Amino acid sequence: MIARKIFTAAAVLFFLTNPAVIFADEAQSFFDRAMRYVSQQDFERAVISFERALEERPGFAEAHYNLGVALEALGMTEEAVSHYESTLSLMPEYAGAMNNLGNAYMALGRTEKAREMLQRAVDTDPSMTIAWYNLGNVLLEQEKVEEAAIKYTRVIELEPKAAKAHFQLGRIYTKLGRFKEAIESYERTLELSPGSKDVMFNLSAAYGALGDREKEIDILLELVDLDPENSLVFYNLGTSLFRVGRYREAVEYLKRSTELEPSYTHSWNNLSQSLLRLKDYPAAVEAAREAVRTRPDFAMAHASLGFALLGMELFQDAKTSFVESIRLLPEYAEPRFGLAIAALALGDNGTALEQKQVLEGLNSQLAEKLAQIISKQ
C-alpha cells in the first residue's frame, strides 16, 4: 500500500516562517478553504481551491504539494507529479515531497525513477520510515528482494511495531524459501495486527511449505470463518486435508471453493481426486469434466477424468482421456500408467507394454507396478 503524507493546518504554519508572508491574503484564504475540504475528504473542491491559491501565489509550495496529494486521491497521478516537482523546485530538501513523488512514479510504472526519488528521500531524511518502506516496495517490484529486505529491516529498526514491514519481510523470506524466518515474520505481524487475513493466509502457506500440515490446517480452519467468501482459502484447506488423507472433509471444502469460484480448475481437479479416494466415481467424473471444461489444456484434469472413468469401468472413454493427457504433457507418468490399465482391460496388451517401456524412463516405481500387473494377465 502506498503511504503518503498531507500537511495539516498546523503543519502548514511550520512552513510559513517568513514574517513577510504571515498575513491574510487571498492565496492563504483559498489554501485554508482547500484544507477544510481535505479534512472532509472532498478532494474535488479541494483541488479547485488549491488551484485558486496558486493563481494568487504561483510559488506557494505547500499548495503545490497538497494539490498533488488531492489529485492523487482523485486518481490523477500524472497531474500530481508536476505539482510534487514544483514543490521540490521551491523546497529542494523537503523529503515528504520526494516520498510522494516516488510513489507517484511507482503508480505510473516508472520504477527506476521511483527508486531514485525514494532513495533521495531517505538520504535527505534517514528517519523517514514511510520512505524506507516505500523504497522497499519499489525494490520488491523490481525483484531486488535482498535489497528490499534491507529497507524493510531499516523500517523495523526505526519503528519496531511497523506491522506492514514485518509482513513484507515474511513475503521476501517466502520468496527465498526461508520458511522458518517467514513464519517468524508473519507471527510477529499477527502480534501487531491480530486477525489480519492476508497474514494468516501466508502464514498457513509457510507452515504447509515446511510440511507442518496440522498447523496449516488449524490456521485455515480459523480463516474460513474470518473470510467465508474467499475461494482460495477453501481450496487450500481442502487440498491440505486431501494431503493428510481426510478426504471427506476435503470434499466439503473443495466443493465450497467451486461454488465460490466455478471457473477455478484446480478446485474441480482436487475435488475429483478426493472423490476418487472415496470411490465415488460418478461424482469424480463430474468434477473432472468441470476441470476439463474450465481448462481444456490442463493435462492433470484429463488424467483425473481418465482414472474416474476407469473406476466406472468405462475403459474406452478412460483410454481417450489418458491419451489426451499424454498429448498435452508427454512426461507426465500417471496417465501413461492409467492408459496401460485401460488398454489391458480392452485386451490391448501391446499398448500396455509400450507404456511400460516409456515409464521405465519416467517413473521406475510405476513401471515396476505395471510390470507386475502385466505378468498376471
Image: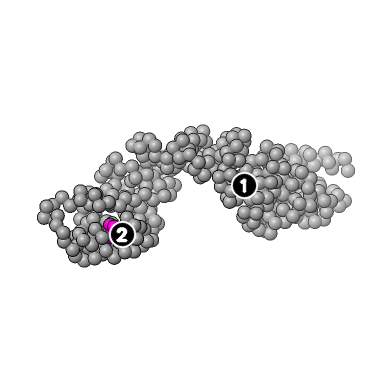
Label 1 CA crowd tier, 10 Å (few <14, some 14–19, many 20+): many
Expressed as whole percent of the image width and height from the top left, the position of residue 165 reads 41, 41
| Label 1 residue SS | helix
Residue drawn 66% across and 58% down?
Answer: 294
- Say whether residue 235 is left or right of residue 321: left
For this orientation, the residue located farthest to the left is 20
Q: Mark 2 points at which residue?
A: 37
Q: Magenta span has 35? A: yes
Q: Looking at the picture, tell me which residue is in the foreground, 180 or 364.
A: 180
Residue drawn 84% across and 42% down?
Answer: 374
Three-letter amino acid code at the position of disc 2: Tyr
Residue drawn 72% across and 49% down?
Answer: 272
Q: Name the residue under label 1.
A: 234
295 is higher (above) or lower (below) than 130: below
Q: What segment carries the magenta color? A: 34-38
Asked if one can make out residue 267 in the rendered structure from this viewpoint, the answer is no
Image quarter of the C terminus: top right
268 is higher (above) or lower (below) than 152: below
Expressed as whole percent of the image width and height from the top left, the position of residue 300 reads 68, 50
Q: Looking at the picture, tell me which residue is in the foreground, 192 or 65.
A: 192
Q: Mark 1 or mark 2: which comes first in sequence? A: 2
- Give residue 40's quadrant in the image: bottom left
Q: Main secondary structure of the magenta part?
A: helix
Which dot marks residue 346?
Answer: none
88 is higher (above) or lower (below) than 337: below
Q: From the image, state whether disc 1 or disc 2 is nearer to you.
A: 2
- Give residue 207's quadrant in the image: top right
Question: Disc 1 versus disc 2: distance between alpha carbons?
Answer: 43 Å
Three-letter amino acid code at the position of disc 1: Phe
